[in-house]
Each structure stands twice: as structure tokens, then as C-alpha cells.
């Protein structure tokens, strides 16, 4: 999977904005977007959450969830050994059942990328081909509080190490202070840093950290801003701030992605991350995606779950469906 | 002036809360003479699943508490039961259609058994454990440890005594339990759950399901995250196939018992749900 080309992204943004992406133009554009009907949004999300998905649909949903997971470890205590065991789990989530699909990607800190790639070996590649890609968080994750030079160096290092996807954080301080031009420029610069010497580019996921943006209006503006600046994916959260991903916030971001697709024909991905631990919750997200942007979005280059403990719960549900009796945590690996 | 009756809603007890069945089902509980007593929740397999999750979450805290502390907590339940004697006596009189004297005897016997088991909490390890003789300069010690989550099909022909006789011994060693109450007499079990909820027993340690044991027991017997199953009240079920299901995941099993001596107090009921762990430790070398 590779990112969109840079020139067209900027041209597209300029055409949509009708001017240079500075604070004033962006401010006018983003504040011109209609406000979010918060009650309506939450009611719609709650309504989508009531669908009952059973038997063969549930089995399909569970397998789809696994194939959309970015299996994640983002701890200060991460070791090469921990990354290797994460990769082993990514490659065969349920060693007792060979029909279990592989996850889409493993998501690690930038310095752990070489160990992940080494452990993946021949399984490293595009999740659309049934292989597993390596995503790295960059740009002073999770706070994003450092200079642009350091963020770019962080990104370039991860890309040089072989990361296929970069998960960057936006500067929430600048966004909340109204410095939209600064946030735009930083995303665009990181996008530039995702470029590889051979001309291809790592896919860029832009983390909004919706828990720190406080309002739905801000989430909608940040989503538009990130897409305008060239993000290939918009991602809810780092997982380090509460609240992390919620269904209403993800629905809102999917609506922005739908509107952008209607406007430009370009498909942007969405990645809810953090706090999705139960299969039941994850199935609600699948329903929301299918009902908002359509089933064609349920592929690894357009939708991902950022999760770690979700996988075990999905495996337990899968074992329940296969064996006909309830399984327990002793029958999946500890991560 | 007459007052409107305020009937009690009897619900399940899972993870320290009193939910209705997720299935929304209830069934009528009738007195010995056939009069309507209450609607009780009819638990589904998913309620059983939720109860096992709650019980698993409680194993660490309850099993890790000191034996002395467990004894104190269990003793306090007996104290609270004593304070609610009148309520239990009235409930049993109505449900079983027995005289006040017989109902009172059952409640007293239940409280006495509870105290008997509470007393064992910090003593049974001395009896069931051992310092093994070895030919070397080290100690070799065997201690009984809780086995984990215990599913119980409570005796079906009494309201309170059978329930207490099956639940108390499993708690003594530090297990958490999922117990299916008597189908015919479920109300005292839920009233006992109210006592547990207001005592010092951590939430999730005891989970009470009411409904059809025939429906729920197979799911508990085959559940991979249940470590042991007490079939004491499963005599009328196809308990042999339950035992076969339990064997698939190597559960400890206690077989059905019947008659007035069913689940009589015994140290064996405590040690049935323990695993003996043996460790060694060096003696001081001079």
C-alpha cells in the first residue's frame, strides 16, 4: 500500500480551499463548515449499535475484524522480544486454527521497526495481498510536543527503516489555538518525509486525538484539515488519552470521508484506535462503516482497528463459533 | 386505608449487580399449594457466560486474600443472615409449604453450616496440606490452592440449606462460584445474594443464576474457563453427559447427591475444589 502523490494532494487542497493554506484561509474554510448536530450524531451511532449480527454474518464479521486489525504495542517497556512475539501473533493469531486470517499490520514505535520487519520475513508486505505491513508511530508520539525538525527526523528514520505506514499526531495545541496553517504545514511536511528514495511513499495516518479536541465541531474541522493536508488515513486516537475511540466520533469522521469522496472522488481511510476491546463493539464499527461509506471501505487500505486486546476477544468468539462451547482466556496467547 | 402491595422483583446476581436475564425471560415461582409467589429471572446461556467472566475477574482478589480474612468475611455473612432470619423463615414457609418450626430449623441449620465452613477458612490448609519428609537439606511443602471458577448446580429440593451447603465450601478455599439455584425454590437464593451484596464479599465472587438447570448446566460444564463443577443438585439431569463435557476441559467434578444428607458438611467438599501445590525451600546450611 502506498500513499497518494504529493503534487495532486496539494493541488486538490488549493482547489477546494480557493487560496493558500494559511491560518486565515483555513480558518474561514473550516469555520464555514456546518456545525455538528451532536444529539443527532449520538442517536445515529446508538441506532447503528443496536443491529443484531448473528451466525454466518457474525463469522464473516469476526474474520473481517481480524483482517482489519493493526496489532499494536506502544509501551515504554517494549523490547525486541515483545515485538517478535507480537509479530508471531499477527502471523498466526490462533495457532490451533489455520483458517484464522492474518491481521493487517503491526503497529510499533519507530525504533522497533527493524525488529518487526526482521520477524515478519516473507510475510511482510501489502495487507491487500494477504501480507502484513509495518506501521510506525512518529512525530513525537503521543504528545507531538517537539519541533518540526525532530518530527521530520523521527518520520524519516522510521521510513528509512522500512515502515510501510506512518501514524503521526497532529499538534493539538496549535489546532486549539487556531493555528490551522501551522498544523496543515506540519502534516504536509511529514507527508513529504514519508517519501522513499524510489519515489514511492509510506501511507500517512493522521491521529487527531479526538479526546483532546473536546467538541465534535473540532473533530470535524481537524478531519477536513488532515485530509486537505494530504493524510491517507484519519485516526481517532493515540490510545494514551481517555476518551479514545468512540462510535459517534468514528461515525463523524466517516461522514467527512464520505463527503470528501463525493467532492473529489478520493477515498480516505479511517482508523478508530484505543478502547475497542470487545468483538461486539468492533462489529458495531463494521456496521457503521458499511452504513456510512459503504462495504467497499471494509478493506485494509481504507479501514483499520488500532487494538491489542481486541484480537483475543475476537479469537474467543471465533472459538465459540467453531467448537460450540464457550472458550476462556487460557486458550489464547497472552500479549 | 388499604395500601397497594409492593411485590419484590427477583433478579439474577452477577458481578455484584442484580441484572434481569439478558434474554428478558422470567418464569413463575409458585408456592407448595400452587399460589403465585413471584416472577424469577430465567437465565440464558449468555447470563451464564457473563457470570463466568465476572467470576474469573474475582478469582485473583478472593483467592489472594489471606485465609484469616476470608474466614472473617464468611463469618460476617452468617452474622447478617442471623439478622434476616425472619425474612428467610417466612420465605421458606411460603415456598415449601412447611410449618414455621421446620422453616426455622432449616434457616438455623444453614447459618450454623455457614459458620462451620467459615471456621475452616484458616484451618483447612493445616489439615489438607503437609510438610513432606524428604531425604535432603530442604523443606518440601504441599499446600492446597483454590482451583479457580467453580460452577455449582445447587440441590433442587430445599430453598436455603442446599444452596448454602454447596456454595460455602467452595468459597472457603478462595474459589469464586457461579451457582444455579433450585428451579422450584429460587427465591431464598436471591435473598441470600442480597445478603452477600451488602457484606464484604468482593463482587463477582458469588454469582447466582435462577432458571432451568437443564438448560444452563451443559454450557457451564463445557465452558473452557470453568475449572470445576459441583453437580450435587443435578441428579435429575443427564449428569453423565455433563461429566463427559466437563472431562473435555479437565474439570474437577463432584457427582450428584440426594436425600436429607445431600451436601452434608465435610472437609472433602472444601478440598474437592483445591489443587495441591508442592514447593521446596532450602534449610539453613551451617
Image: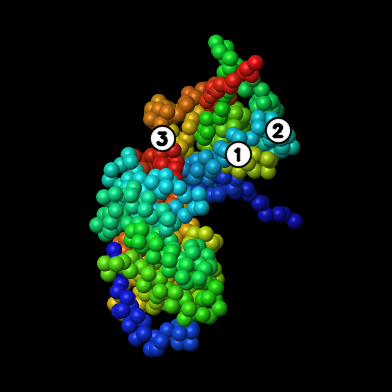
Secondary structure under tag 2 reads helix
Q: Is residue B225 above or below residue B130?
A: below
* Nearer mark to the viewer, of 1 and 3: 1
Element assignment for label 1: helix
Tell me what residue is drawn at x 43 percent, y 64 percent: A154
Residue matched to label 3:
B222
Asked if residue A255 shows in the view, the reply is: no
Looking at the image, residue A296 sits to the left or right of residue B164; the answer is left
**Picture quarter containing residue A167?**
bottom left
Q: Nearer the viewer, residue A285 or B117?
A: A285
* Same chain assignment for discs 1 and 3: yes
The relative height of residue B208 versus residue A259 in the rendered view (above or below) is above
Q: Position of residue A181 (x, y in %)?
A: 47, 81
> Which circle marks residue B61 in the picture?
1
State which tag comes first along the sequence, 1 or 2. 1
CA distance separating discs 3 and 2: 34 Å
Q: Chain of mark 1?
A: B
Instruction: Count residues near mark 2 (Cα–Cα under 10 Å), then give few for <14, some for 14-19, many for 20+.
Output: some
Identify the secondary structure beneath mark 3: helix
Amino acid at each position: 500500500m502506498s500513499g497518494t502523490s504529493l503534487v495532486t494532494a496539494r493541488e486538490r487542497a488549493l482547489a477546494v480551499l480557493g487560496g493558500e493554506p494559511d491560518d486565515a484561509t483555513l480558518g474561514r474554510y473550516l469555520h464555514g463548515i456546518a456545525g455538528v448536530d451532536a444529539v443527532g450524531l449520538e442517536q445515529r451511532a446508538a441506532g447503528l449499535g443496536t443491529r443484531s449480527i448473528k451466525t454466518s454474518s457474525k463469522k464473516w464479521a469476526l474474520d473481517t475484524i481480524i483482517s482489519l486489525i493493526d496489532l499494536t504495542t506502544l509501551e515504554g517497556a517494549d523490547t525486541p522480544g515483545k515485538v517478535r512475539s507480537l509479530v508471531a501473533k499477527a502471523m498466526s493469531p490462533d495457532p490451533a486454527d489455520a483458517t484464522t486470517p492474518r491481521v493487517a499490520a503491526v503497529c510499533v514505535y519507530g525504533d522497533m521497526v527493524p525488529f518487526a520487519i526482521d520477524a515478519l520475513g516473507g510475510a511482510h508486505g501489502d495487507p491487500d495481498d494477504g501480507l502484513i505491513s509495518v506501521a510506525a508511530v512518529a512525530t513525537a508520539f503521543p504528545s507531538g510536543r517537539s519541533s518540526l525538525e525532530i518530527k521530520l527526523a523521527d518520520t524519516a528514520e522510521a521510513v528509512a527503516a522500512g515502515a510501510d505506514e506512518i501514524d503521526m499526531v497532529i499538534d493539538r495545541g496549535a489546532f486549539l489555538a487556531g493555528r490551522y496553517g501551522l498544523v496543515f504545514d506540519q502534516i504536509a511536511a511529514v507527508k513529504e518525509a514519508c517519501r522513499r528514495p524510489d519515489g514511492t511513499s509510506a501511507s500517512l495516518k493522521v491521529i487527531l486525538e479526538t479526546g483532546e479536541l473536546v467538541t465534535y465541531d473540532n473533530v470535524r474541522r481537524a478531519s477536513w484539515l488532515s485530509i486537505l493536508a494530504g493524510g491517507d488515513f484519519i485516526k481517532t486516537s493515540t490510545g494514551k488519552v481517555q476518551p479514545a475511540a468512540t462510535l459517534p466520533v468514528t461515525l463523524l469522521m466517516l461522514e467527512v470521508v464520505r463527503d470528501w469522496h463525493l467532492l473529489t472522488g478520493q477515498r480516505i481511510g479511517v482508523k478508530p484506535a484505543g478502547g475497542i476491546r470487545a468483538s461486539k463493539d468492533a462489529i458495531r464499527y463494521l456496521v457503521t462503516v458499511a452504513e456510512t461509506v459503504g462495504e467497499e471501505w471494509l478493506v485494509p487500505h481504507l479501514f483499520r482497528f488500532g487494538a491489542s486486546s481486541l484480537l483475543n476477544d475476537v479469537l474467543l468468539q471465533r472459538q465459540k463459533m467453531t467448537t460450540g462451547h464457550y472458550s476462556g482466556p487460557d486458550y489464547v496467547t497472552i500479549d | 386505608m388499604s395500601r397497594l402491595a409492593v411485590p419484590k422483583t427477583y433478579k439474577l446476581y452477577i458481578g455484584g449487580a442484580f441484572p434481569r436475564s439478558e434474554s428478558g425471560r422470567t418464569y413463575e415461582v409458585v408456592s407448595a399449594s400452587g399460589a403465585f409467589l413471584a416472577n424469577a429471572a430465567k437465565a440464558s446461556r449468555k447470563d451464564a457466560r457473563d457470570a463466568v467472566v465476572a467470576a474469573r475477574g474475582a478469582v485473583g482478589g478472593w483467592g489472594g486474600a489471606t485465609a484469616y480474612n476470608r474466614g472473617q468475611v464468611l463469618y460476617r455473612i452468617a452474622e447478617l443472615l442471623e439478622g434476616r432470619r425472619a425474612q428467610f423463615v417466612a420465605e421458606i414457609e411460603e415456598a415449601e409449604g412447611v410449618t414455621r418450626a421446620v422453616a426455622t430449623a432449616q434457616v438455623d441449620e444453614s447459618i450454623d453450616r455457614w459458620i462451620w465452613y467459615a471456621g475452616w477458612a484458616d484451618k483447612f490448609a493445616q489439615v489438607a496440606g503437609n510438610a513432606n519428609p524428604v531425604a535432603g537439606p530442604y523443606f518440601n511443602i504441599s499446600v492446597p490452592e483454590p482451583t479457580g471458577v467453580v460452577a455449582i448446580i445447587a440441590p433442587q429440593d430445599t430453598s436455603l440449606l442446599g444452596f448454602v451447603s454447596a456454595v460455602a465450601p467452595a468459597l472457603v478455599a478462595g474459589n469464586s462460584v457461579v451457582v444455579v439455584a433450585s428451579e422450584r425454590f429460587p427465591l431464598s437464593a436471591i435473598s441470600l445474594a442480597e445478603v452477600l451484596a451488602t457484606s464484604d464479599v468482593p463482587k463477582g465472587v458469588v454469582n447466582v443464576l435462577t432458571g432451568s438447570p437443564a438448560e444452563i448446566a451443559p454450557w457451564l460444564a463445557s465452558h473452557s474457563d470453568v475449572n470445576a463443577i459441583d453437580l450435587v443438585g443435578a441428579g435429575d439431569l443427564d449428569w453423565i453427559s455433563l461429566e463427559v463435557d466437563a472431562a473435555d476441559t479437565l474439570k474437577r467434578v463432584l457427582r450428584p447427591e440426594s436425600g436429607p444428607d445431600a451436601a452434608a458438611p465435610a472437609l472433602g467438599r472444601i478440598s474437592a475444589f483445591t489443587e495441591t501445590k508442592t514447593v521446596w525451600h532450602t534449610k539453613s546450611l551451617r
